[in-house]
Image (spheres, rainbow, N blue to C red):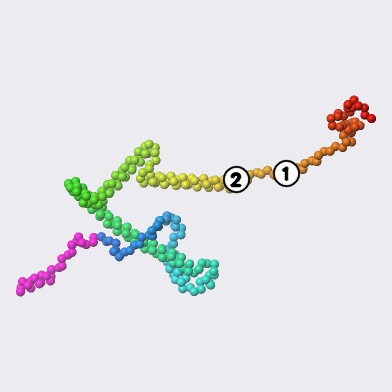
Amino acid sequence: MTTSHTATKKSATTPAAEPNTATKAIYKIPPATMNIPSPPAGFVPTNGDDYRGVMPRKSELLVLEDVVTELENSKDFTAIFGRTLPSVAIIIGLFNGGAQWSSTRAKASAFDAYCRAQEGLVWIDLRNLMAKIKPVFEQAVSSDSSLAGEFPALGRLLGAQSAIAQRGAATRKANKAAEAKGEPVVRGKAAKAKTKAAEKAALAAQNAAKAASAANVATAPPEATSPPVVASASAPPVTTSVAAQVATNGAGTAATPGTASGATNGVAHS
């Protein structure tokens, strides 16, 4: 009885065994019920700078939903504001769409900031862990090459940083060789940056040339135009009377074609 009583007492006072710490979640993980939709198929992201001048201000977002409520409750909006505006349904749809997308983007941005923080915290420790695993893994593989085939993904993960560093070193070496020859760099981020800068400079020069050409056309003096040529009226043909010809020739007879003035051709005139 004593033994039984003692065993019962011990079982009542002994705390429950702690769960294995290996099964505990050390870091926060995304909620299992979280559902982040993917963008529609075919969506192509645009440049956010295109919308810089039209994005809503906080003061506008604070009252936007109230505006939608007012419009939905209004029964004589068209009678009050006239028919020059779009229909009240279109206005409500635009205001509501702006409010909903701005609210969704604000929530997504806040959650994205939270995700970046959690991601960074986990990867700090994960990098340290990978640095410890790598030499052990490499030593084990050097002793038993079959381990590389058993853990191929782990090998690629641990060697990813080295592969990236090797590619970066090769890129820098190739770019230095190209610069030594006077050739443009064609590899890596430096090449992309220089190419982009050159394209921007060419576009700026092209736009400047177009603007200068347009300015020259606008300020050029008008070309001098000669007055229209008006054909002068032709003088009437001069007709000389026989008497005038006689007076001019100083003879009593008019000169006939082929006969010189005052000549008789050997024939006396009566």
Mark 1 is surrounded, within 10 Å at the Cα level, by few (under 14), some (14 to 19) or many (20 or more) other residues, namely few
In the orientation shown, which residue stands out farthest toward the top? 266
Q: Which residue corresponds to the image point at 21% horizontal and 51% vertical from the top-left?
A: 150
Quarter of the C terminus within the rendering: top right
Helix, strand or loop at label 2? It is loop
Residue labelled with disc 2: 220
Q: Position of residue 162 (x, y in %)?
A: 27, 47
Identify the image quadrant of residue 15: bottom left
Residue 137 in view: no
Helix, strand or loop at label 1? It is loop
In the orientation shown, which residue stands out farthest toward the right? 270
Q: Is residue 179 above or below residue 115?
A: above
- Spatial CA distance of label 1 from label 2 is 30 Å
Mark 2 is surrounded, within 10 Å at the Cα level, by few (under 14), some (14 to 19) or many (20 or more) other residues, namely few
Residue 97 in view: yes
Q: Which residue corresponds to the image point at 91% horizontal and 32% vertical from the top-left?
A: 252
Give the left or right position of residue 133, taking residue 45 as reference. left
Q: Are marks 1 and 2 in contact (CB under 8 Å)?
A: no
Q: Which residue corresponds to the image point at 87% horizontal and 34% vertical from the top-left?
A: 245
Which circle, 1 or 2, is nearer the viewer? 1
Q: Amino acid at mark 2?
A: Ala
Residue labelled with disc 1: 230
Q: Which mark is residue 70?
A: none
Give the left or right position of residue 156, taking residue 267 as reference. left
Quarter of the N terminus within the rendering: bottom left
Q: Is residue 221 above or below residue 21?
A: above
Magenta residues, start to end: 1-26
